[in-house]
């Protein structure tokens, strides 16, 4: 009997300070969250948490919710990361290696 993997997904949303309009939370972050939530639900993935770093540069890993997400991955609470930007996944693999 084949066991189906249960995915606990982290939804990661980020917008650089340079791209932000100065709102408390940018419209792009809201759009990312909505898009990723719909995708997760359509594919039957459990959403463990949404991690948002609005106003942080992607150059550095020194982002509070990125670090919190890494901690959840390391502790086995999350086994899938969904993000709008594919380069985030590449950086994540490099950071966890």
Image (cartoon, rainbow, N blue to C red):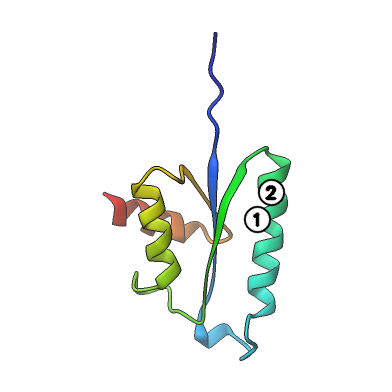
In the figure, 74 relative to 85: above or below? above
Please state if 44 lies on the left or on the right of 77 as rendered: right
The residue located at (62%, 41%) in the rendering is 45
Figure quadrant of residue 69: bottom left
- State the image coordinates of residue 8 (x, y, percent, origin top left): 53, 42
Please state if 6 lies on the left or on the right of 71 as rendered: right
In the figure, 83 relative to 19: above or below? above
Crowding near the residue tagged with mark 2, few <14, some 14–19, many ≥20 C-alpha atoms within 10 Å: few
- State the image coordinates of residue 28 (x, y, percent, origin top left): 66, 74
Q: Residue furthest top?
A: 1
- Residue contact at pointers 1 and 2, CB within 8 angstroms: yes
The residue located at (26%, 49%) in the rendering is 97
Circle 1: element type: helix
- State the image coordinates of residue 36 (x, y, percent, origin top left): 65, 55
Camera-nearest residue between 41 and 49: 49
Q: Residue furthest left?
A: 97
Crowding near the residue tagged with mark 1, few <14, some 14–19, many ≥20 C-alpha atoms within 10 Å: many
Please state if 84 lies on the left or on the right of 95 as rendered: right
The residue located at (46%, 46%) in the rendering is 78
In the figure, 65 relative to 40: above or below? below
The residue located at (36%, 56%) in the rendering is 71
What label sits on residue 36 in the rendered view?
Answer: 1
Cα–Cα span, label 1 and label 2: 5 Å
What label sits on residue 72 in the rendered view?
Answer: none
According to the picture, the residue beneath numbered tag 2 turns out to be 39
- State the image coordinates of residue 6 (x, y, percent, origin top left): 55, 32
Q: Quadrant of the N terminus?
A: top right
Circle 2: element type: helix
């Amino acid at each position: 009997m084949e066991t189906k993997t249960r995915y606990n997904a982290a939804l990661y949303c980020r917008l650089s300070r340079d791209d932000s309009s100065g709102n408390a939370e940018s419209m792009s972050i809201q759009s990312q969250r909505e898009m990723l939530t719909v995708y997760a639900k359509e594919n039957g993935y459990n959403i463990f948490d949404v991690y948002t770093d609005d106003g942080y540069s992607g150059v550095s890993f020194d982002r509070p919710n990125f670090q919190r997400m890494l901690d959840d991955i390391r502790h086995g609470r999350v086994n899938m990361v969904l993000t709008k930007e594919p380069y985030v996944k590449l950086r994540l693999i490099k950071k966890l290696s």
